[in-house]
């Protein structure tokens, strides 16, 4: 989608610190990090939100979590733990309407969420 900033990052048309890219997903550092590690994992294909997932996307979603796990290990936050978040829609706090999984770590996360 031409106006989508995450599509532009996937296509290398907008700058970002990409930490992983393959034929299904791209992961890059959030430009306004809220934790020492704050990485966004996005499908390369434009999917607006969880609401727009289609049958057949289950493997893609599972793969996003797999990449998050690998990146957590690479960032050395896997043993202490980390938080994975997918905000969905306005009430969910979604501000960029291209599905993304936040990987947050490197500090003790505050609770309660919400
Ligand atoms: P959300 O509020 O769940 O939609 O999260 C969107 C996230 O994308 C926020 O944490 C933003 O800081 C981040 N973000 C927006 N634009 C960019 C960008 N161009 N590069 C990196 N991170 C971005």
Image (cartoon, rainbow, N blue to C red):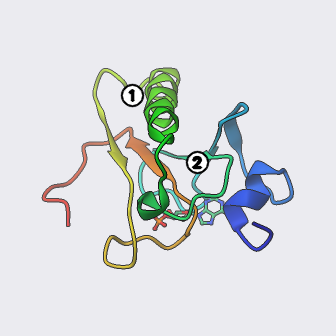
Front in this rendered view, residue 97 or 35: 97
**Numbered tag placed on residue 77 in the rendering:** 1
**Numbered tag placed on residue 42 in the rendering:** 2
**Tag 2's secondary structure?**
strand
Q: Residues within 10 Å of mark 1 (few under 14, many from 20)?
A: some
Which numbered disc, 1 or 2, marks the residue that appears first in the sequence?
A: 2
Front in this rendered view, residue 43 or 76: 43
Image position of 67 with respect to 112: above or below: above
**Tag 1's secondary structure?**
loop
**Numbered tag placed on residue 9 in the rendering:** none
Q: Quadrant of the C terminus?
A: bottom left
- Could you give the CA–CA distance between mark 1 and mark 2, rounded to whole angstroms? 20 Å
Q: Quadrant of the N terminus?
A: bottom right
Is ligand 1 less than 8 Å from the beta carbon at label 1? no
Q: Position of residue 30 (x, y in %)?
A: 57, 55
Image point 55% across, 69% down: which residue?
97
Q: Nearer the viewer, mark 1 or mark 2?
A: 2
Image point 58% across, 48% down: which residue?
42
Q: Position of residue 111 (x, y in %)?
A: 15, 55
């Amino acid at each position: 989608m031409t106006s989508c900033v995450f599509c532009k990052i996937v296509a290398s048309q907008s700058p970002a610190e990409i930490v992983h890219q393959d034929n299904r997903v791209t992961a890059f550092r959030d430009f306004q990090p809220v934790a020492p590690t704050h990485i966004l994992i996005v499908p390369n294909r434009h999917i607006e939100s969880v609401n727009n997932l289609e049958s057949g996307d289950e493997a893609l979603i599972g793969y996003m979590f797999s990449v998050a796990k690998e990146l957590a290990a690479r960032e050395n936050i896997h043993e202490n733990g980390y938080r994975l978040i997918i905000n969905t829609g306005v009430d969910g706090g979604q501000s960029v309407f291209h599905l993304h999984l936040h990987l947050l770590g490197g500090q003790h996360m505050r609770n309660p969420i919400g």
